[in-house]
């Protein structure tokens, strides 16, 4: 088990003081971004449903549901917090796995940290880094092996189990079983069906978090699993670079609530109207040129928050009218607004081979706005904002996003305290205080 042995060594031996400074900072950036998405996501209908499920079917006093402070079993809390983390589709992502590692990892670490004694901020961040690095690699391997595009929970569960194993200090043999159990029981959800028919299933992240937590607990009790996915990789460099090349440095972050594939079009539409100083009533038609997967996003009038997120025409329309796409925009009653629906009716989406060839390495679009007096205004080729590299958001921008998402939920004082705690997270010796500030 050459590759698995390297994975195990990475999980067990990673130590905060020896990590590159940029990786340590990225782990705190990821914590801030994923936690902000989760706290805000607890206001959505799906989070309410899952809280009722957990408190009736997965009862316990081991771990905390954020915002409400209600207690459940460790697996039950991971389930609810996992659904909340991706409920607004505003959580981080990794382009080549076409999904979201952070919202799969954080709920599991939150639960695991509450069922062990003495978990520190450093332990927590070490587990986050483990979770991201293992989840992304598991996703790359899974998408190499299987033709069908599977959801984030299908590989995020493996990363979550690795993170939980790190917190729970599982020995090598138990950790192997935890990873194998997570792979075997992970939700193998056909993602494009979830895009064609938006539902609360979303990216199967809530269920992936539940499986991750359960897998670590089952393995700790002696439950055995299959040989983990890492031996199946046809590209050994994915594992050989572990601990040297940190995939989490190549994450994208999301300024808008909604599918990443629609966000280049949002940027393009905003660019054209801003540069031209257009009055929205002057717009006759908007043409979006993009890749096929993005074109598969819905163009029907949304009836739910999930419809609004898995749409191409809704986020473009509401961004033009409101100037942002956030929790308020993708929730009732805003999703029923007649002005937004009128704008949606003026949008046409066209697939172009030049953009298809770039996907999934790059997600691009071009937007043409045709005015009522016959002018054609073009955005040029655009990508979504906050891509990795030079366009990555600054710490200050991520902090501003956190306030935007969290202050309406927890209030200004608690939001400020959480921001301060996150930037100094490695100094925490007692995580109970942190959890208290995550409750309304």
Image (cartoon, rainbow, N blue to C red):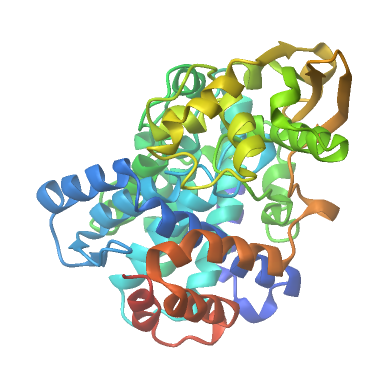
Determine the image quadrant of residue 366. Answer: top right
Considering the image in quadrants, where does the N terminus appear? top right
In-front residue for pair 49/131: 49
Q: Which residue is found at the position 50% from the left and 39% from the top? A: 155
Determine the image quadrant of residue 145. Answer: top right
In-front residue for pair 169/336: 336
Compared with 21, 220 (above or below) is above
The reply, left or right, for residue 346 in relation to residue 148 is: right
| Residue 73 percent location from the top left of the image | 20, 59
Q: Which residue is found at the position 62% from the left and 68% from the top? A: 399
| Residue 431 percent location from the top left of the image | 39, 80
| Residue 273 percent location from the top left of the image | 79, 34
Residue 397 visible (yes or no) = yes
The reply, left or right, for residue 283 in relation to residue 439 is: right
Q: Which residue is found at the position 37% from the left and 83% from the top? A: 433
Compared with 119, 237 (above or below) is above
Determine the image quadrant of residue 385. Answer: top right
Considering the image in quadrants, where does the C terminus appear? bottom left
| Residue 191 percent location from the top left of the image | 49, 24
Q: Which residue is found at the position 81% from the left and 21% from the top? A: 368
Compared with 229, 29 (above or below) is below
Count of numbered tags: 0
């Amino acid at each position: 088990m050459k590759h698995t042995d390297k994975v195990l060594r990475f999980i067990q031996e990673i130590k905060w003081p020896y990590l590159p400074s940029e990786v340590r900072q990225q782990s705190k950036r990821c914590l801030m971004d994923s936690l902000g998405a989760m706290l805000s996501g607890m206001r959505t209908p799906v989070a309410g449903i899952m809280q009722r499920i957990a408190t009736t079917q997965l009862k316990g006093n081991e771990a905390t549901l954020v915002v409400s402070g209600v207690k459940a079993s460790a697996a039950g809390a991971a389930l609810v917090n996992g659904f909340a983390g991706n409920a607004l589709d505003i959580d981080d992502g990794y382009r080549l796995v076409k999904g979201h590692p952070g919202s799969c990892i954080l709920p599991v670490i939150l639960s695991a940290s509450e069922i062990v004694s003495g978990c520190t901020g450093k332990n927590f961040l070490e587990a986050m880094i483990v979770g991201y690095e293992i989840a992304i690699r598991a996703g790359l391997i899974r998408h190499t092996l299987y033709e069908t595009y599977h959801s984030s929970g299908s590989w995020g569960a493996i990363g979550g189990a690795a993170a939980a194993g790190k917190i729970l200090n599982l020995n090598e043999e138990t950790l192997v079983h935890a990873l194998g159990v997570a792979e075997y029981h992970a939700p193998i959800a056909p993602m494009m069906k979830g895009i064609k028919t938006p539902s609360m299933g979303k990216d199967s992240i809530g269920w992936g978090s539940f499986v991750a937590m359960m897998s670590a607990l089952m393995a700790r009790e002696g439950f055995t699993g299959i040989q983990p996915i890492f031996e199946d990789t046809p590209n050994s460099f994915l594992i050989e670079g572990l601990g040297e090349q940190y995939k989490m440095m190549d994450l994208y972050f999301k300024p808008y609530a909604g599918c990443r594939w629609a966000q280049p079009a949002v940027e393009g539409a905003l660019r054209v109207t801003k540069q031209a100083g257009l009055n929205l009533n002057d717009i006759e038609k908007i043409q979006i040129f993009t890749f096929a997967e993005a074109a598969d996003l819905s163009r029907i009038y949304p009836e739910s928050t999930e419809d609004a997120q898995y749409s191409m025409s809704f986020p473009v329309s509401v961004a033009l009218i409101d100037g942002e796409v956030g929790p308020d925009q993708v929730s009732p009653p805003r999703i029923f607004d007649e002005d937004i629906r009128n704008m949606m009716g003026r949008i046409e989406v066209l697939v172009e081979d030049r953009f298809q060839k770039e996907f999934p390495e790059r997600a691009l679009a071009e937007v043409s706005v045709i005015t009522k007096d016959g002018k054609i205004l073009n955005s040029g080729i655009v990508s979504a904002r906050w891509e990795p590299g030079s366009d990555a958001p600054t710490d200050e921008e991520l902090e501003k996003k956190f306030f935007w998402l969290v202050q309406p939920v927890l209030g200004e004082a608690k939001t400020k305290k959480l921001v301060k705690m996150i930037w100094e997270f490695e100094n925490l010796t007692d995580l109970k205080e942190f959890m208290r500030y995550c409750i309304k």
